[in-house]
Image (cartoon, rainbow, N blue to C red):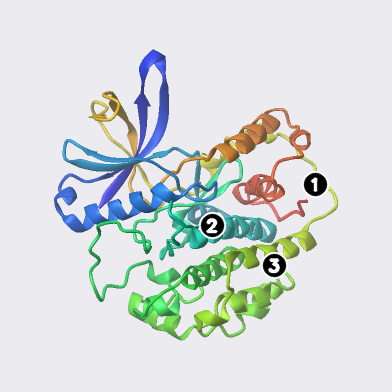
Amino acid sequence: MARVYRAEKSGPMGFATEVALKIVKRKAGKRSEFVHLLTREAVIGGFIRHPNIVATLDFDQVEGHYYIAMELVEGQTLESLIRAAWRSGSSGFPPGLALDIVQQICRGLSYAHALEDRNGKRLDIIHRDIKPGNIMVSNHGVAKITDFGIAKASVETGVVTATNVVRGTPLYMSPEQATGRSLDFRSDIFSVGLILYEMLTGNRLFEMKDIVSTMESIARAQIGETPKQVDAIVPGLGAVLRRLLQLNPRARYDDADEIELELAELSAALSSETDPEIHSLRDSLRSLTTSATRQAVTESKGKTPTMFDSTSGNRISVDVLSLESMDGSHVREMAEHQKLEAAAASAAANDQLATAPWVDPVIRRTYLGLKQVLEGKAPEAIE
């Protein structure tokens, strides 16, 4: 349907900025369904202003190509991190890092679920495709939800949605989503539980031999001894996971904020009073993109293509590296976290992370925990 390119947009006086450019393929652009999905993502994205969610910079079409422009984030998907953590010989996903990443996901979801339009009308946004491939983790520890292409919202997008069509990724659907019933925000909360379980165990809870069997397994939502299994990893987490994965949506959490608060308490119990000894941090984050298993990157040959931006009158130069999957959509860093990331990067370069005590502790721990995952080290307690 679409490709995401690393692109450079230039302006006057030598100004240039890198963006992620999601473009509907030319042939697909003639099919209204694909354009409608991109329009849905752009319109919803236009309302969103949160550091843990994709932020849309522009939406337009030029020369027959529809595109969304998003600010580039250097990092990788949670899916890649999970694969790196559970590759042969690795020690698994550090539990503390898993809790911190999920806390950030919950921050973004809580914001989206409660978001109102400019007139104060609740948008009732439901992402409907929360999965590891749609979570980006930046090199400095900020987790961000991407790809609202199949999100549901009350905002008028001009999109005519096909009836009786189940949208989403089967492995991460809620029971009501898998069976085509009506959804609310608690469907996303169920998906969060599946992601948390996968990080901690390396397994997908309801995965079966084929899609049909998988969806039938999700529809039953029988989790068996799963709470005891995760309790052995993080004491107290079993009760949280049991509530996340309830068959009845009304029995799940009423708000993602509530999940974040409970995970924060468990994170505090895992943390030591002092940080682990830090050595050679200046190189640790630079090695992220080469150490982890990443989404396929295809090198295009020939002259670098360009696109004309009708708004600015400038040409957009598209880099030769094309990210083949929409799941890897790079997204914009919000101003608040640009400051956080700049501080973390500066501290890493000087091996002096402790000089930035104002950095969000959850992001700080995520930043430090990435090294454990990508180097296959045993989990360490991080304050």
Q: Nearer the viewer, residue 115 or 259?
A: 115
Q: Position of residue 225 (x, y in %)?
A: 62, 83
In this view, the mark in front (1 or 2): 2
Name the residue located 40 percent from the left edge and 13 percent from the top edge.
13
Tell me if residue 87 can be seen: no
Kind of residue sitting beneath label 2: Tyr
Q: Position of residue 233 (x, y in %)?
A: 70, 69
Marked residue nearer the N-terminal end (3 or 2): 2
Question: How far is mark 3 from mark 2, CA to CA?
Answer: 17 Å
What element does badge 2 sit on?
Answer: helix
Kind of residue sitting beneath label 1: Asp
> Circle 1: is it few (<14), some (14-19), or many (20+) Cα within 10 Å?
some
Residue for badge 1:
275
Name the residue located 53 percent from the left edge and 65 percent from the top edge.
195
Name the residue located 80 percent from the left edge and 42 percent from the top edge.
277
Question: How far is mark 3 from mark 1, CA to CA?
Answer: 22 Å
Q: Position of residue 309 (x, y in %)?
A: 26, 30
What element does badge 3 sit on?
Answer: helix
Marked residue nearer the N-terminal end (3 or 1): 3
Q: Nearer the viewer, residue 150 or 322?
A: 150
Q: Position of residue 346 (x, y in %)?
A: 66, 29
- Residue 262: which disc? 3
> Circle 3: is it few (<14), some (14-19), or many (20+) Cα within 10 Å?
some
In this view, the mark in front (3 or 2): 2
Marked residue nearer the N-terminal end (1 or 2): 2
Q: Are marks 1 and 2 in contact (CB under 8 Å)?
A: no
Q: Are marks 3 and 1 in contact (CB under 8 Å)?
A: no
Kind of residue sitting beneath label 3: Glu
Name the residue located 71 percent from the left edge and 61 percent from the top edge.
264
Residue for badge 2:
111
Q: Residue furthest top?
A: 13
